[in-house]
Amino acid sequence: MSSEKNDVPAWEQRFRAARVSLPDWADDAPERSLYVSNAAGTYEVYAWDRSTGTHRQVTDRPSGTTDAALSPDGAWIWWFDDTDGDEYGVWRRQPFGGGPDQEAVPGLAPSYEAGLALGRDGTVVVGRSTDEDGTTLHLLRPGAAEPVEIYRHAEYGGIGDLSHDSALLAIEHTEHGDAMHSAIRVLRIDGAGRATTVAELDEVTGRAEPRGLACQGFAPVPGDSRLLLAHQRRGRWEPLLWDPLTGAETELVLRGEDGGPLPGDVSAQWFPDARTLLVEHEFEARSELFGYDLASGELTRLDTPRGTVAGATARPDGTVEFLWSSAAEPSAVRSTAGSVVLRAPGAVPPRSVPVEDVWVEGPGGPVHALVQRPAGPGPHPTLFEVHGGPTHHDSDSFAAGPAAWLDHGFAVVRVNYRGSTGYGQAWTDALRERVGLIELEDIGAVRAWAVESGLADPERLVLSGGSWGGYLTLLGLGTQPDDWSLGLAAVPVADYVTAYGDEMEALKSLDRTLFGGTPEEVPERFRASSPLTYVERVRVPVYLSAGLNDPRCPIRQIENYVARLAELGTPHEVYRYDAGHGSLVVEERIKQLRLELDFARRHLKP
């Protein structure tokens, strides 16, 4: 569909065009799949029976639904039911073919979600997180009247995986107090529901340089107790096979065509036969897929276009399905068989502009930025779109937001600052103590390049972002007041001390790791990193948007910042909406971007 044949502008078409996530499938009923789509105007869960080709919308809630899982036999669809996007709720389930919803684990009070494991024999493990209890894990065996608690700790943790026979449970925990580097514990669960520790891998406690571990899953075949992990022993993510029953470990060093280890981060998952691994290689904002034969050690690249794989899964027939896109090309679920497996109904959204890779020398080393240029000569009005996370990264993938700004004549720059993933552990872990200020040093270096190179008009520079990107936007407007012409902050941290007091427990744990303590223990660090500290120095108009039910960047701390802007007479506008940390409603997303575009139009020089 082109804008010439439709009165709807191209940028709105991209938002309204239906999207689908990578389908999940039932382990023992692979023709039954589950995915998330916005086809009905809100992101909801859909069931797909591949044998009949039928699709069915499973959930229908005003605020949308994204967290869902299939039971291994494909009989049940589980989905997480919160209130207006506040992420606090309970699991419900309904039959795959349709029927009434029922509370999936009666007796468990609402909580934040900390994982779900569904066993082939009907065993269920539910992870919960609350301010009062920390992390608790609850086991429900087939035929049991109610779940029993098998794990509890004040620090955040979550479920890794259940073994094929449901006798072993892997959990990721941060009992050592470092929320950026998890340890792995494996529990044996007996018939009475008692859990005892079998083995533990902890590469944080007592180490000068902590290393993280992540659970990738137990071998999916009977009698195989091997657990696939990701580790950081060489300063980046790589796969590791560990048998918790014997203690045997096998580090898998995967090498490229030049004979050296694959650069960047490497993760893996099992093929259904447990003889091959599906490997995802992530390097410099792009990703590719490989198959790795465990017996021969042979690594075979799978045919994936240049861009970003947002998820992949190996099917029982040996094919691999993956969700792929690039900055220019919209996403689709593809197969290594050479076909598009699943594309959302309706028109394909209009293409956008490819990205250019730019490397700028920063105070902590070379900084990678992704740049998109509009038509015509520069210098251009330029939007610095700052990613959230903070342990995340921008990639060469399709995004409706940046494409909209390009359509309006803006250049778009996205910076993978220190703290971003995909550039090695040292780059990610640099985000400590001088929180926010470190990232802004890197963003500032790229800003200087953008002006000096002739890309960006220094009088029309917009700093923008959501979540952690919104936080960096407000902090940047106060600490770099001469560098920016306008600020657009969505669901930001604005007053860090108040945010810490109100946010969900999992984020409190992360903040203690980043700052080295609580606001009471290290008040000077929280003050130095809080946008509220520098609000008097903000010289440009500020637009803020906030979710009334947001548990991550709660509304009260944003109101504190807005009140100071009002007292100071700083031009600003605030949009409050009835949802959580962002909206799952398509029209609401369009409305929010339209408000941002209008704010920029009114406050930037022509």
Image: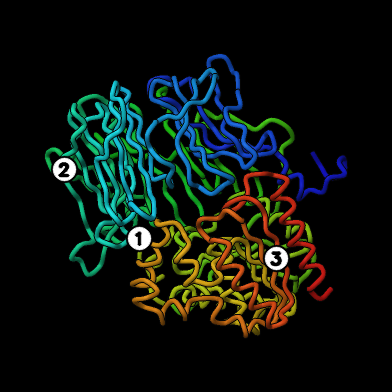
The Cα atoms of the two marked residues, 3 and 1, are separated by: 33 Å
Judging by the rendered image, the residue that carries numbered circle 1 is 180
The mark nearer the N terminus, 1 or 2, is 1
User: Is the residue marked by circle 2 packed among few (<14), some (14-19), or many (20+) residues within 10 Å?
Assistant: few
**Position of residue 377 measured from the top left corner of the image (x, y, whole percent):** 78, 69
The mark nearer the N terminus, 3 or 1, is 1
Outermost residue toward the top in this view: 52
Judging by the rendered image, the residue that carries numbered circle 2 is 197
The three-letter amino acid code for the residue at tag 1 is Met
The Cα atoms of the two marked residues, 1 and 2, are separated by: 23 Å
Asked whether 502 or 249 is in front, the reply is 502
**Where does the N terminus fall, quadrant-wise?**
top right
Judging by the rendered image, the residue that carries numbered circle 3 is 574
Asked whether 455 or 68 is in front, the reply is 68
In this picture, is 196 found above or below 257?
above
Relative placement, left or right, of 445 versus 123 is right
Which of the two marks, 1 or 2, is nearer to us in this view? 2
The three-letter amino acid code for the residue at tag 2 is Thr
Which of the two marks, 2 or 3, is nearer to us in this view? 3
In this picture, is 375 found above or below 438?
above
